[in-house]
Image (tube, grey):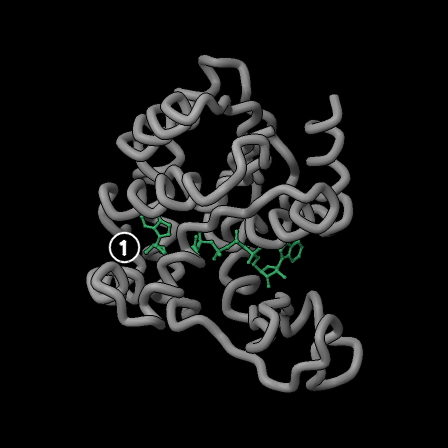
Amino acid sequence: MNIILLGPPGAGKGTQAARLVENRGMVQLSTGDMLRAAVKAGTPVGLQAKAVMESGGLVSDEIVSGIIGEALDALKSDTGVIFDGYPRTEAQAHSLDELLASRHRKLHHVIELEVNEDALVERITGRFTCATCGEGYHDTFKQPKANGVCDKCGGKEFKRRADDNEETVRTRMAEYRAKTAPILPIYEARGIVSRVDGMADMGDVTEAISAILDA
Ligand code: AP5
């Protein structure tokens, strides 16, 4: 099964994708994660993406569709994929159709996480991850059980994203409204869009997504 998780920055796409990976053995393809890895490694893609990401703008359609194509090629054909943060523009939506069709894959669900934008700034500016295993935490909503120690791997170093400041978050939200939300009608016309209350408790969001996938 191949699905898209759609929603503005901080809606919970990464959180829910990680749970689907753990519970269902699906693979998460997050263009944000792949671009951050490229920036860290100093690759040509990373060099092009760095300043755009720090400003909250969108990296070019060619770059992100290129990295998604390469990532799909590295997977077995029967591995279920969660697209997290891709597509983000109409051009990317069309590219995804071509990338899937040429690999004999189908898109089964587009799940939109509906959220109250006012709450997202708090969610994003409070977010941090384990520097060792990437487990996600939050200053208010999800602290490690033992202070300063990762629940999952015992790591003691944590990091915050360079673009998780209020000014950049507001730009990212404006980009979502202007360029990403308008792609929903493409999938609505195919009857594959479901909506989930992304303001609910994390576990309830996970259950709502599971119910859609199992229906
Ligand atoms: P990307 O990494 O994709 O960031 P984003 O879309 O802004 O999404 P986030 O990762 O910020 O949020 P999320 O929805 O995953 O939320 P999370 O689960 O972490 O993209 C970054 C940049 O890369 C872009 O700005 C762009 O420059 C570039 N880029 C990436 N893809 C691109 C593309 N396709 N085209 C062009 N450019 C691209 O949750 C947030 C926090 O809230 C966490 O702390 C979590 O614990 C907490 N939380 C989650 N759910 C709940 C809940 N239900 N209740 C309470 N707290 C919750």
Q: Is residue 166 left or right of residue 89?
A: right
At x 58%, y 76%, the residue is 132
**For the point 45% across and 21% down, which residue is it?**
104
Amino acid of disc 1: Gly
Does any atom of ligand 1 lie closer than 8 Å to the CB of label 1?
yes
Q: Is residue 15 above or below residue 161?
A: above
For this view, does 43 lie left or right of residue 4? left
Q: Which residue is mark 1?
A: 57
To which quarter of the image does residue 66 belong? top left
Out of 103 and 5, give the one closest to the viewer: 103
43 or 78: nearer the viewer? 78
- The spot of residue 64 in percent (x, y) is 31, 46
The quarter holding residue 204 reads top right
The structure residue drawn at horizontal position 38% and vertical position 37%, both measured from the top left corner, is 87
**Which residue does the image show at 40% across and 50% down from the upper left?**
31
User: Residue 141, position in %: x, y?
Assistant: 69, 65
Q: For the image shown, how many numbered marks are present on the structure?
A: 1
